[in-house]
């Protein structure tokens, strides 16, 4: 006797030549990770708002808060926390020692995002 649930699932399963599935997979693989999106959004904020000014602690916090709100809103807390941790781990000690202005930080953040 055939199980109706399995028969339906087998019929509905995408095949290797399914063009819609190929499109979805290509789009998924082309989408940057949440951590990369977080760093890019922070870089966008730093570039847009006084890029020649020195980056302060409060400016850094604001850039991260804006990026968090823009990118991670709607995701479960553990997903957002994981993305935030990955993003922060991508920042090297050299960045902290060399980047001074908001614009310089934006460049560093974009470079780090490419590696994620």
Image (cartoon, helix red, strand yellow):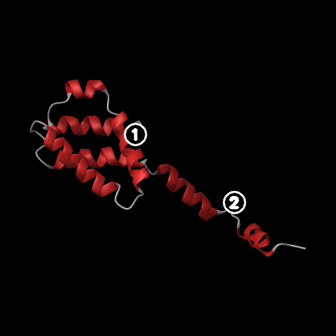
Name the side, left or right, on which 4 lies relative to 63. Answer: right
Q: Which mark is residue 2?
A: none
Expressed as whole percent of the image width and height from the top left, the position of residue 108 reads 27, 34
Q: Quadrant of residue 6?
A: bottom right
Proximity of marks 1 and 2: CB atoms separated by less than 8 Å: no
Q: Quadrant of the C terminus?
A: top left
**Helix, strand or loop at mark 2:** loop
Q: Which residue shows up at 82% across the image and 72% down it?
A: 3
Q: Quadrant of residue 17?
A: bottom right
Q: Which residue shows up at 33% across the image and 35% down it?
A: 111
Q: Quadrant of the N terminus?
A: bottom right
Question: Which marked residue is nearer to the observer: mark 1 or mark 2?
Answer: 1
Residue bearing the label numbered 2: 17
Q: Nearer the viewer, residue 69 or 47?
A: 69
**Considering only vertical position in the picture, is 113 above or below 17?**
above
Residue bearing the label numbered 1: 86
């Amino acid at each position: 006797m055939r199980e109706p649930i399995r028969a339906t699932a087998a019929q509905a399963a995408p095949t290797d030549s399914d063009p819609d599935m190929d499109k979805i997979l290509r789009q998924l693989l082309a989408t940057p990770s949440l951590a990369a999106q977080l760093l890019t959004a922070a870089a966008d904020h730093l570039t847009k708002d006084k890029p020649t000014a020195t980056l302060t602690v409060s400016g850094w916090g604001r850039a991260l808060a804006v990026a968090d709100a823009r990118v991670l809103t709607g995701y479960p807390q553990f997903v957002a926390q994981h993305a935030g941790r990955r993003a922060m781990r991508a920042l090297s000690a050299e960045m902290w020692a060399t980047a001074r202005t908001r614009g310089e930080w934006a460049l560093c953040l974009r470079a780090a995002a490419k590696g994620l």
